Image (tube, grey):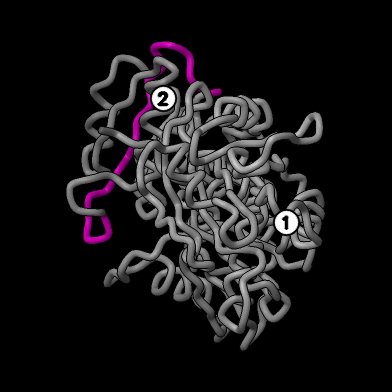
Amino acid sequence: MERTPRGSRLHIAIVGRRNSGKSSLINTLTNQNVAIVSPVAGTTTDPVYKSIELLPLGPIVLIDTPGLDDTGELGNLRIQKTKEILQKADLIILLVDINLGLSYLEEELISLAKEKNIPVITVFNKLDLVRSLPDHTMAISCKTKEGIPNLIKKIIELAPQQNKKLIGDFVNPGDLFILVTPIDSAAPKNRLIMPQVLTLRDILDHYGVALVLRETELASTLASLQTKPKMVITDSQVFPLVDKETPRDIPLTSFSILMARYKGELPELISGINTIKKLKTNNQVLIAEACSHHQQEEDIGTIKIPLWLEEITGKSLHFTWVKGGDFPEDLTPFKLIIHCGGCMLNEKEMLARITQARQQNIHILNYGTMIAYRYGILNRALRPFQI
């Protein structure tokens, strides 16, 4: 069964003190035993992610988190991990043990969520253990499932609407798009990379026509077409060849630039271009990659981009790499951040990283804009979006 990638799903974090029933709620909402349930406090030691369909809302990710009241040195680290979840949460379910009530821990979490404009549903669990509650209180029992339908209705009511389109707002029924997808040592075996899959699906969802081919077939295919394509979209690594072989009257861009537009703020993700020209010897550059794939022989993030930057600037630079969910809180040591397309991050987390960079006055750009700039075709790649 085809699954919506995690980065394209709403992220709903379930937060609360130890033994408030967070793991039980995950199991109740999924109708599966996906989270370990135990009377031992602190059973959940790391965030646990579960992708489900919650109709009529659609595909979501539920995040089970460590307790807000965890103890000891490791406990403090787990609490920090829980608070970091706020960077990616679109909605928070704050679960409270009905016998204990709200404490300063829950109040602090509500304040943090308010600062980040994250909606919070405060839910009292273990309804089966009490006889009455104050009016207007959301209460459930994970044991008997009482109140769960009302909770689901509230989730659907408060969940942010995802209206952004990757390319769909450019697609009219019948429009032809050419997707150039190299198959080389960096291509995953037996599948396309995520931005290519997402772009293809968005075109099909809007009744467009997609022609997927290798870069070696582009020239002959364009020559054989009787209808001019609406746009050519290419992998950034073959930008120079595709730029050369695509007539100037056909719009051209890259999957990575589409991802920058979809997951973040495209103008912000080209703001670092002018900073490239100002880099000096020994300046530090942060390269952030949201996935954790094994390094390839000609890896973009660890090999090619550092070489290109030093080639463009003529300077010897220092590079730091972070992968997956890691991203430094203090960005001030860096003169520039170069980020991947962010297909493994949801929009919330990608925007949080962009905002963090902006607040610390550090310019940021992504792989696609960096590569297009390197080959002198950035203006052409941005032209379809009037930037």
Amino acid, disc 1:
Thr
Q: Range of the magenta residues? A: 169-187
Going from the N terminus, do you reach mark 2 or mark 1 first? 2
Question: Which element carries disc 1, helix, strand or loop?
Answer: helix
As for residue 174 lying within the magenta part, the answer is: yes
Q: Main secondary structure of the magenta part?
A: loop
The N terminus appears in which quarter of the rendering? top left
As for residue 22 lying within the magenta part, the answer is: no
The C terminus appears in which quarter of the rendering? top right
Q: Residue at x 56, y 25 (%)?
A: 149
Number of marks: 2
Residue 46 horizontal/vertical position (percent):
49, 66
Q: Taking 170 as reference, is 160 left or right?
A: right
Residue 314 horizontal/vertical position (percent):
56, 80
**Residue where numbered disc 2 is placed:** 203
**Residue where numbered disc 1 is placed:** 355
Q: Is residue 167 visible?
A: yes
Of residue 294 and residue 85, the one placed in the foreground of this image is 85
